[in-house]
Amino acid sequence: DGVHFPHGSPPASIGHRALAVNLSDLAAMGARPAWALLALTLPAAEESWLAEFAAGMDALARAHDVALVGGDTTSGPLCVTIQVLGHVPRSSALLRSGGTAGDPVFVSGTPGDAAAGLAIEQGRLQAGAETAAYLRERFLYPAPRVALGECLRGHASACIDVSDGLLGDAAKLATASGCGIELEYDELPVSGALAQAVGRDRAREL
């Protein structure tokens, strides 16, 4: 609380995001998720908060056929820890280390939207109602690309999710593959909402 999600975030979003970021890691390996373990530390057992948190996590888990199979609860500052396990056919996992010089680099989705959504949540960015709603949704309820990850098996040479930011994660991919990497900003998919909310230069930064 206050590190990976803003204090006072909607409980459903916390449940969704905690699972989504882990599903995204499996997606980046071409794996199909199956089970999740949840360690939940709570300052108090509030029924309404827990119901919303569980609903947010449950909806995403059901969408990807993930079963919650165990974990632990304890008392303390709000902290959510999830471990997700899944399957990938032998020798077909997507790794960060498979890239070679000359490989083209692709990114799915529209990077920067969630960062703008966080800025709106924190009151650091103002936008029109429709634009703000779209960007907040991108932060509060990210969509792990599990199906895309499975489709990339046998096609992508290396893969990583970009939850830590496109530039930083691209560097991790390049380092693991022993290559340099060159990104062309003008080729990146930037959403109309992001461009409208912050302009071209700030969109590039986000």
Image (cartoon, rainbow, N blue to C red):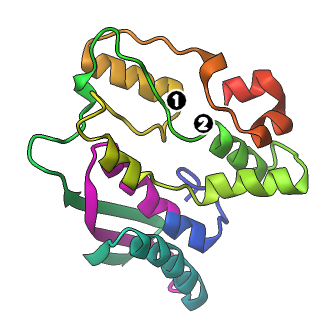
Residue 73 lies, in percent from the top left, at 35, 78
| Horizontal side, residue 120 vs residue 26: left or right | right
Asked whether disc 1 touches disc 2, contact meaning CB atoms under 8 Å apart, the reply is yes
Q: Is residue 47 magenta?
A: no
Left or right: 127, with 202 as reference point: right
Up-down relation of residue 171 to residue 50 (above or below): above
Give the magenta-colored segment's residue range.
17-45
**Label number found at residue 111:** 2
Q: Residue 56: in sight, yes or no?
A: yes
> Which is nearer the eye, 192 or 68?
192
Judged from the image, the secondary structure of the residue bearing numbered disc 2 is loop
In percent of width and height, residue 118 lies at: 68, 48
Task: State left or right for residue 134 relative to residue 92.
Answer: right
Magenta run includes residue 33? yes
Mark 1 element type: helix
Tell me the CA gap for discs 1 and 2. Answer: 7 Å
